[in-house]
Amino acid sequence: MIDFGLLGFVQRAPEWMRPGTGVSGEVALGPDPDAYRAGITDIATRTGLIYPWRIDRIVVETAVRVPASPEDCLRCNNPALATNSPNRRAFRDTRVPRPETDWPPGEMLRYYLHCTLLSRIPRMPDARDEHPRFAAPPDA
């Protein structure tokens, strides 16, 4: 877990990261409700990590896929790593994400959620967050 003002977790931290290690940089949050709700990490089942947010704007980014730099491939231990072409990117607003129509073949797709945090007090998972695979049948 990294403390950056809010609580969060990552399933696969870099090998060099150890408890108490200081880090600096930008934080990008990627919501992963399925992993959290399925309880596949102990930290998620013991710690409240659900914050209330208001989505103010959704921006779609599409870009041509290009190979990442050799340095990034080495750092990520992935020789096939791809990234966005900085010269061939497009951004547009959308009201509803639709990957099936937003995603041009052979390109990368990202959604940027511009949000307002409504409370810094996280809550624990409850029945609202139960993963559909593990939910009790409605007639149970």
Image: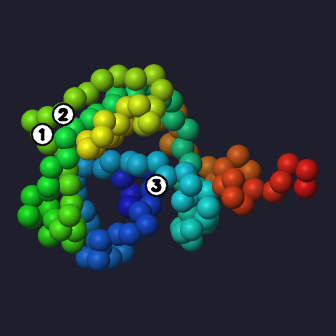
Identified at 41% across, 31% down, the residue is: 101
- Regarding residue 81, the answer to whether it shows in the image is yes
**Is residue 44 found left or right of 137 in the rendered image?**
left
For this rendering, which residue is in front, 8 or 33? 33
How far is the residue under mark 2 from the one under mark 1? 6 Å
3D distance between C-alphas at marks 3 and 2? 32 Å
Q: On the rendered image, what quadrant is the C terminus found in?
A: bottom right
Q: Earlier in the sequence, mark 3 or mark 2?
A: 3
The spot of residue 3 in percent (x, y) is: 39, 58
Q: Nearer the viewer, mark 3 or mark 2?
A: 2
- 38 shown above or below 42: above
Residue type indicated by callout 2: Arg
Decide: marks 2, 1 in contact (CB < 8 A)? Answer: yes
Query: SS class of the residue under badge 2?
Result: strand
Q: CA distance from mark 3 to mark 1?
A: 31 Å
- Residue placed at 20% from the left, 64% from the top? 80
Query: Mark 3 or mark 1: which comes first in sequence?
Result: 3
Secondary structure at numbered mark 1: strand
Mark 1: amino acid: Pro
The percent position of residue 79, horizontal first and vertical second, equals: 18, 68
Residue lying at 27% horizontally and 35% vertically, measured from the top left: 62
| Residue picked out by circle 2 | 89
Q: Are marks 3 and 2 in contact (CB under 8 Å)?
A: no
